[in-house]
Image (cartoon, rainbow, N blue to C red):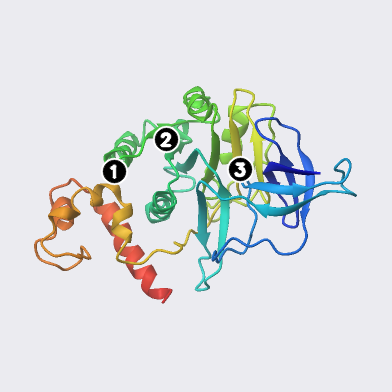
Amino acid sequence: MEGVATVVKNAGSHFLLSPLPVWEAFPAVLRGKVRLGRSAATNPVAVGDRVRYELEGEATLEHPAVIKEVLPRDNYLIRRSTNLSRQAHVIAANLDQAVVVVSLYFPEVKLPFLDRILVTCEVYKVPVLIVLNKVDLYREEAREQLEYLRKIYEGAGYPVLETSARSGEGVEALRERCRGRVNLITGESGVGKSSLIKALDPSLDPKVGRISDVHLQGKHTTSLYEMYRLASGGYIIDTPGLRGFGLVDLEKEEISKYFPEMLAVTDRCRFVPCTHTHEPGCAVKEAVADGRISPERYNSYLGMLEEDRKFR
């Protein structure tokens, strides 16, 4: 028997598939090589992929289905190793939304890291929602910083939602945004992704980690890539906490195109192409100078140009 299903769990060499929107998970394995065209990714199959499989009888752990083909993806999110290798890893595929979770403190938000995720989402056409979690811990003391962060990213065109998994603030609004969609939840280790998933649906129980007191860095608590069905409707893909996010398949001349606020003014640059670094009459630098583009986002862009040189 042949069929088509969606990968809902990736445990390395073993998978769970389900014929979404029906939730009936069954085991599967890869036999032989499944290639993704010219992709440099180390994993040919990702959670969210639609695959063609073969199965004789009923799928069991002893007799799993066999994945034969990965069907074309609508989109996907991919990252490169933070070392100088060319290796890349597909985080998830066929996404309706990437929910990028950050916290202002504990751990402190790293804007260059966040901006690399946002650029990658722009490249691969994944809509983004930025979730500022743990606001119950610092709202009154850090209202000015919170508002400035919102101004940076809402000014760049991204929706920002404040949440607290502990107090429940913003959870219902997030639940509504996730309803009926395939949602990837991603972010740095320790930002509270697992706690937020459990707040969205208390019947789910992804592992919840603690923050390291020494370095204020989150400990890795999720080792598998897995999709959960939300009782309120829709699906959540949970990922391991990330500690780095390298760009993939992006030439330095293209990077500015994936900053929406920079793209909006580049046609007014005096020179084409313009790197927006040293050229006279650069509309991007003018927009940074007069506050239409945040200096933090511009500095992230410069950092990506420098990163591109390292990988060459």
Residue 270, percent across and down?
Answer: 10, 61
Q: Which of 141/273 is in front?
A: 273
**Residue labelled with disc 2:** 138
Q: Residues within 10 Å of mark 2 (few under 14, many from 20)?
A: some
Q: Amino acid at mark 3?
A: Asp
**Residue labelled with disc 3:** 238
Number of disc labels: 3
Q: Nearer the viewer, mark 2 or mark 3?
A: 3
Q: Which of 148/172 is in front?
A: 172
State the residue at coordinates (59%, 60%): 36
Which secondary structure, mark 2?
Answer: loop
Against 15, residue 280 (above or below) is below
Q: Amino acid at mark 2?
A: Tyr
**Residue labelled with disc 1:** 156
Against 311, residue 258 (above or below) is above
Q: Residue furthest front?
A: 1
